Image: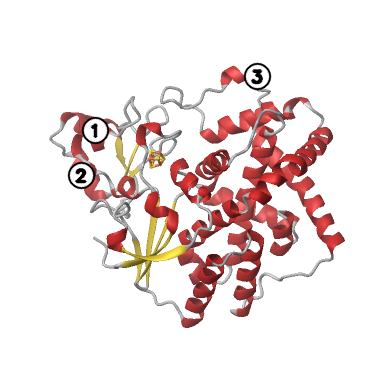
Amino acid sequence: MQSNKNFFVPEYIQDFRCIGKDCIDSCCVGWNIGIDKETYKKYKNSTNNEIKSIAKKFLVKNDLNSNINYGKFVNQNNCCPFLNRDKLCNAFNLLGQENLSIGCATYPRNIKIFDKIGFIAGSLTCPEIARLCLSKQDLKIKKKNINKLLNIFNSHNVFSTQTTKKISNKKLQFMREVFSTINDNFTFFDTLKQIIIAYEKKGNSKILINHFSKNEKEKIKKDLLISDTNIMATLCFSKLAKRNTQVDQSSIKINNGKNIEDSRFKKIRKIAAIKSEYLFSPKKDFVRKFSFIYNKKFDKFRKKNDFIFKNYFVNEFLKNIENLLNSESTFSDFIREIIFYITLTNFLCVCQLFDDNKKITINSYAEVLSAVLKSVNHSPEKNGQFINLFRKIDKNNTFKRLLALY
Ligand code: SF4
């Protein structure tokens, strides 16, 4: 049980329950599941024959210096070998919740205890937690006692990263200002702007708030929409184009536990390529049509549901709080990273809107964001490359990039 009793949480987290077999994905698909040392030994020496036999075949040592990632499961058909045909976990079924590994018991929650202050956020790679996070209007950060978070601390194996390092008063002040800005009814753009100003006041001038005229703003938005569209198209479609893939509707099967070769991200990329006819149109025509659909169809959705972007930011702020409070340089990169994943998600959603019958909803947006995060956000190396690319294009001016969203 956690020593800390109070946690800052985004309100939606209290509503989360894993939906198991009804999930459009599964956290047991696509990843090699890390197994902590105690669970590794428990599975290897289990008296249950099924557990023992799977552990013998698929559980291998991974990082002997790490307690959490001491072992890992080698995937079978891209899934954890404990995942059964009904998309349920056999370790859970046979041994019960308390015998899940630390990682499995904790996902998709991310818990940090920093100088005795606790923070909880969701991993939006889980489509259900992404849906809850994005659909909560007027999302607030609340301080909650552990007794009110029983859906989170529902097993002894739930893990929190703990650090005894003290947060300086200056940083505590910054954090309070961020929380109060988040809890005010600002738009996403104004929330970020206020936080950037608070950050600069903290003595960091890494991000400058520029004052652009209306015409300058329009030009920045237009230019970045074109350059981002080209970048996102290359990122999402180049492999499809290179392989000259015969992409047709029949090749896309939604994961029902039988066909799990393609990740959700790959399926969404294929659908986006088909709907937008990217592989068969000259690039210039594609970009022109993309800008038209973005402004005509997507912009309405974006303006009406501005809170979904703010909610994503709030969750990620809490999730990354330790890095953000510890490092002076990560804040502008953090903002750039948030905008990168929004831009990539927007791109894939707009490509689907080339189809006149396709409607965008908060749930469909959350599905795409979650798929993007599961496939791309998991690799720190890829993350770094994208941030650098964005930095190059916006000439190290995060505020300019922020404008591109508006
Ligand atoms: S991804 Fe989320 S909803 Fe789906 S099985 Fe995992 S925890 Fe449950």
Q: Secondary structure at mark 2?
A: helix
Give the image location of residue 263, x and y in percent: 51, 33
**Residue at image point 68% right, 51% down:** 303
Q: Which mark is residue 117?
A: none
- Residue ranking furthest to the bottom: 169
Image quadrant holding the N terminus, namely bottom left
Q: Is residue 65 visible?
A: yes
Give the mark, 3 or 2, whose residue is nearer the N terminus. 2
In the image, what residue occupies the spot 71% across and 29% down? 356
Instruction: Name the quadrant of the C terminus.
Output: bottom right
Q: Which residue matches tag 3? A: 246
In this rendering, which labeled residue sits more in front, label 3 or label 2? 3
Residue lying at the far right in this picture: please name it: 215
Give the residue drawn at x 42%, y 22%: 258
Check disc 3 and give the amino acid type: Gln
- Quadrant where ligand 1 appears: top left
Residue wearing tag 1: 56
Q: CA gap, disc 2 to disc 1?
A: 11 Å
The front one of 311 and 160 is: 311
The amino acid beneath tag 1 is: Lys
Which one is in front, 296 or 401?
Answer: 296
| Foreground of the two, 300 or 230 | 300
- Residue 288 lies, in percent from the top left, at 82, 38
Query: Does 211 sit above or below residue 296?
Result: below
Q: CA distance from mark 3 to mark 1?
A: 40 Å
Q: Which residue is mark 2?
A: 41
